[in-house]
Amino acid sequence: MDGTRNCETCASEGGLEFGAECARDFGSVDSGGGRAGRRTIVRISVCIITLNEEANLRRCLQSCTGLAEEVVVLDSGSIDGTEGVAQEFGARWIVRDWPGYMRQKNNVIGLAEEDWVLNLDADEALSPGLRRAIEDLKKTKPPDSVGGFSMSRCVYYERRWVRHGDWYPDRLVRLFRREGSHFEGGRVHERLELSGDIRKLEGDIEHYSFADSADHWARCQKYAWLWAEDARDAGKQAGVFAPWLHGAFRWIRGYVLRGGFLDGRQGWRIASLNAREVFLKYRLLRRLNEAGRVTA
């Protein structure tokens, strides 16, 4: 796959596991012909975008302490203590107006100075297992054919780690070569495009995404509207039964087929809210379709 274009979703389709064992197999060679030992070969820029993330950023940066050669925080106008937290950890702090998720993520990648980028959201943190896998990787020289590494993401929801349903493993490419990588997409749910193979890293990104179910539903409504606008702009149409059919399928997939019921009442709530979000997406799209026909 060297030289081909890949997005994050490809990571779940058969990449090789890359943990401590694989890292040793890659073992690099120093100038004397032996193992490079603990010498850092993979140099990393941690890249984070923020807006009023004082409550989350410290946890994120603590999980990365001593792991990367630099930390870049690109802010879009925080009025809380986000900047103070970033400076506490020695991060490079830059402020730019908000141009949208995709463009801001590309902006922060453009500010990175190292060859590899570890892209995190402020409400995420590295699990101990994932940190160890990255530490092992830093002592190796990955083949030139490898463009990125994927990792699973585990959501902390209502005081429980969610390990089933639509939310897990949610494997994403978050560590990748800076050169030739960029984000594409619409108003929300951007995707990473890169060149080369994708390997898997052991361990999880810990995602502290929602304060409670009310916060969850508020974001569902926001994302549903952004999705509907993107779908309308792309010429997508929604039939009269589309909200009901897509919503029902999402619930069955998340709660039954992917084992969401194993996460107890949290699994039920997640599946139900996800289904409501999908229903809302297609209902909003129908409204936009109808408004477009009226104005035409």
Image (cartoon, rainbow, N blue to C red):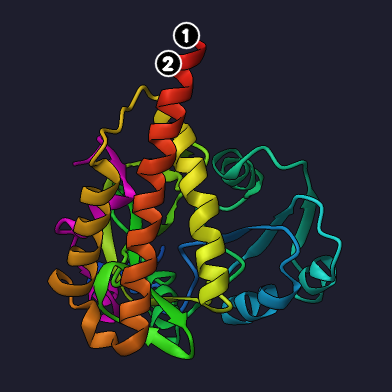
Q: Is residue 275 above or below residue 256?
A: above
Is residue 96 shown left or right of residue 236? right
Give the quadrant of the N terminus.
top left
Residue at 37 percent of width and 83 percent of height? 266
The location of residue 282, given as percent across then percent down, is: 35, 42
Quadrant of the rendered structure where residue 267 is? Answer: bottom left
Amino acid type, residue under disc 1 in the picture: Ala
Q: Is residue 162 visible?
A: no
Residue 291 lies in magenta, yes or no?
Answer: no
Q: Residues within 10 Å of mark 2 (few under 14, many from 20)?
A: few
* Quarter occupied by residue 46: bottom right
**Label 2 belongs to which residue?**
293
The magenta stretch is 1-24
For residue 296, the mark is 1
Camera-side residue: 129 or 114? Answer: 129
Are the residues at dot 2 and dot 1 in contact (C-beta closer than 8 Å)? Answer: yes
Residue visible at 71% across and 77% down in the picture: 55
* Mark 2–mark 1 distance (CA, rounded to whole Å): 5 Å
Q: Is residue 219 left or right of residue 244?
A: right
Q: In front here: 51 or 226?
A: 226
Give the image location of residue 2, x and y in percent.
23, 40
Q: Residue at x 79, y 68 (%)?
A: 82
Residue 153, horizontal then vertical, whole percent: 38, 71
Q: Residues within 10 Å of mark 1 (few under 14, many from 20)?
A: few
Q: Residue at x 56, y 62 (%)?
A: 218
Image mark for residue 171: none
Q: Amino acid at mark 2?
A: Arg
